[in-house]
Amino acid sequence: MKCQILHESRGRMRVHIATARMTVKEADILQYYLQSKDFIREVRVYERTGDAIIYYGGAREQLLSLLARFRYEGNEGLVPEHTGRELNRQYEERLIGAVARRALSIAFCPHALRMPLAIVKAVPFVLAGLKSIFHGRIEVALLDATAITASLLRGDHDTATSVMFLLTVGETLEEWTHKKSVDDLARTMSLNVDKVWVESDGEELLLPVTEVSVGSIVIVRTGNMIPLDGKVISGEAMVNQASMTGESMPVRKLADSVVYAGTVVEEGECRIRVEKAAGSGRYDRIVHMIEESERLKSGTEDRASHLADRLVPYSLGGSVLTYLLTRNVTKALAFLMVDFSCALKLSMPLAVLSAMREAGRYHISVKGGKFLEAVSDAETIVFDKTGTLTYAMPRVERVVSFDGQNEEEMLRLAACLEEHYPHSMANAVVAEAKRRELRHEERHTKVEYIVAHGISSFYEDRRVLIGSYHFIFEDEHCVIPEGEEERFRSLPEEFSHLYLAVDGRLSAVILIADPLREEAREVISALRHVGIKKAVMMTGDSQRTASAVALRLGLDEFYAEVLPEDKAGFIRREHEQGRKVIMIGDGVNDSPALSEADAGIAISEGAAIAREVADITISEGDLHSLVVLKELSNALMGRIQKNYRFIIGFNALLIGLGVAAVLQPANSALLHNISTVGIGMESMTNLLKREPAESRTA
C-alpha cells in the first residue's frame, strides 16, 4: 500500500493513504489490521480524509514495512461483525445535512416562501402534540407543538423554524449518542469464547469455537459459557440467561431444551447439538436486550426524566395564567419557548451513556447507568483474593506426593480433571503439566464440579477427588496415610494448597504460589481517597494466609475459609446497615456475591459465570481500573447534579426575563435551545483528564 507521511514524532505517525476515496469498510480493515500487531498501541483511521494516526512502540522501520506490505484483500476476517464506524458516518451525515439545509434556507429562501415552508415543517411536531393529548398525557411534545403553533399564528416564522431546527439537532444528537453507547456496549458483551469441548468418536476434544460446525456435539459444564445456539441432547443444567432474556433466575435445561450462545451454565452439565454457527445474530439480540432493559437507566437519570414530564403542565399553566393576568401574548409565550424538560431529557441520558462509553476507553465494560451510580454511592468494597488481589495466573511451586504415589502421575491426573473448569488455580495446574510435557488424555468418567469445593470423578475405577481442605477432609472424610501426618503438617503455609485424594486417601498436595498484585495496596489506599470507607477481603484460604494478606494490604476486615453463601451473606448484612456495596471477584464461587452487591465487578479473564452475573467487567491486567471506575462514577454524578442546577436556574431566568418583557420570545427560544444543545454537547465530553494506560506513553 502506498502512503505519505504527513507528520511524525517519537512513537506517533500520521499518514495519508494514497487512494481516491476510502470507504468505511476499507477504514475498518486498515484499523483492525494495524491493531492486530503487538507493537501498535493505538490507531485512529479517518475515512473522510484517508488519514491514519498510529501510536507505536517498535522501530520506525518496522511500522513502515508493515504499511508497505498491507493489502485490503485477505484481511477482511480481522474486522468484527459490527464496528460502529458506519453508525457514526450515518449520524454525521444527518447532522451535516440538517445544518446545511438550515444555512441554505436562511441565505437563499425567498421571504414569501418562508411561512409556507415553516407550516409544512411544523406538521410532524403538531401531530406529535395531538398524539400526546389523545393518549391523555401532557408531555414535552405538546409543549413543543404549542410553542411552534403560537409562533406561526403570530406570523413569527423565524422563531418557529429556529425552534424546530434546534429540536431536530437535539433529538439527533441524543439518538446518536444512545445508539453509539448501545453499540459499544453490545460489542463489548459479544461472545468471547476461544475454545470449546467437542465430542468426537467418544472422546472430548478442545477445539477453537470457529472450527465447530452445525451438527457438532459440544459439552458445557458448570461455570462455562454456552458458545453456540443449539439443543440439549442429554444432561441437565441450570442456565443463566440474563444476557439474552433479562431473567434473573437460572432456567432448568433438559433434553430437547433450546439453549443460546452467551448464556452460562450455573450448575450441571449438558451435551448440546449445535444448530447455528458462530456469529449468527447474537449481536442483534444483545442490542435488543440492552434497548429493552431498564437496567440502562440510573436512578438519577430516571428521576430527571420523570421530573421533566411533571414540569410540562406547569409550563403550560404558567403560560395560560400569564396571558390571563397580562393579556399579553408575548409574555405568555415566554413559558412555551423555554421549557425545563427538553434539557433534562437530553443532558441526563447523554451524560450517563457517554460515561459508559468513556469507561470502555479504560477497558471497563458497564452494563447500565445505574451501576455507575451505585459505584459512586458505595462505601464498602469486598474483594475475593485469588485472581483479584493476587495475579490471575498463579503457578505451581511444588507437587508433594503421599501414599507412595508418583509426583508426575498425580500432576497428570490433576490436570486431566482441572482442564474442564476455568479457574486460576485450575489453569495453574494445567499450565504446569504442559510445562513438564505431561500428556493427560481423557481416561476418567464424568466429572462433577462442586462449587467452591472441588471436583469428583472416577479414574480407572478409582474415585478421585481434588479440591479444598474442607472438601477433601471434612466433606469427603478422606484420610492422611499413616506415618505421613508430620510431613503433612510441615507443608509451607505461604502457598495455597490443592488436595488430591484417590479412594479416600490423600495422594498429593499441589502447592500453588499466589503472589499479591504489586499495585493492590496502592489501589486500596487510592480507593479510600475517592470515597471508599471499608475495604474487606473474603477468601476460601486458611486463616493464617488470609491474615498475612490483610495485614500487608491494610484491609479493614478479612474473612477466611468462607463459602459462596458467606460472601453473599456479608453483603446482605452491609445492606441492612444502610451501606451500598461493591463486590469484585473472578470465580464461579463469587457469582452469588456479585449478584447480591449493588455493583458486582468481574475480572475479564475470570470464569464466564462471574462475567455474566457481574454488572461491570474490568481488565485483569491492572487493579487501577477500580480507581478509574470510582473516579468516573463520582464525576458522572457530579456532572448530573451540575447540569440539573444549571438547567433549572438558567431556564427559570429566561422565563423571568420573558415575562418581564426584557427578552422577546424569539430570543428566549434561541438562548434556551442554544443552552440545551450546549449542555448536551458538554455532557458528551470526557469526565476524566487522565489517558488510558496504553496511550500514556505514546
Image (tube, helix red, strand yellow):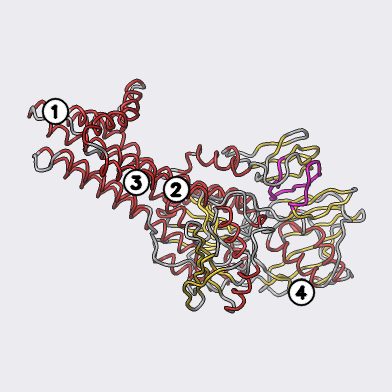
Query: Which residue is tagged 2?
Result: 369
Numbered tag placed on residue 321 in the rendering: 1
Nearest to the eye among marks 4 and 1: give it.
1
Distance (Cα) linking label 4 and label 1:
84 Å
Numbered tag placed on residue 398 in the rendering: 4
Q: Is residue 293 above or below residue 389?
A: above
Residue count near mark 1 (Cα–Cα under 10 Å), binned few <14, some 14–19, many ≥20: few
Q: How many marks?
A: 4
Nearest to the eye among marks 4 and 3: give it.
3
Q: Looking at the picture, how far across and down is residue 95, in whole percent?
A: 39, 46
Disc 4 residue type (three-letter): Arg
Disc 2 residue type (three-letter): Gly
Question: Could you tell me which secondary element the residue under label 3 belongs to?
Answer: helix
Distance (Cα) linking label 4 and label 2:
46 Å
Query: Which residue is tagged 3?
Result: 100
Question: Could you tell me which secondary element the residue under label 1 belongs to?
Answer: helix
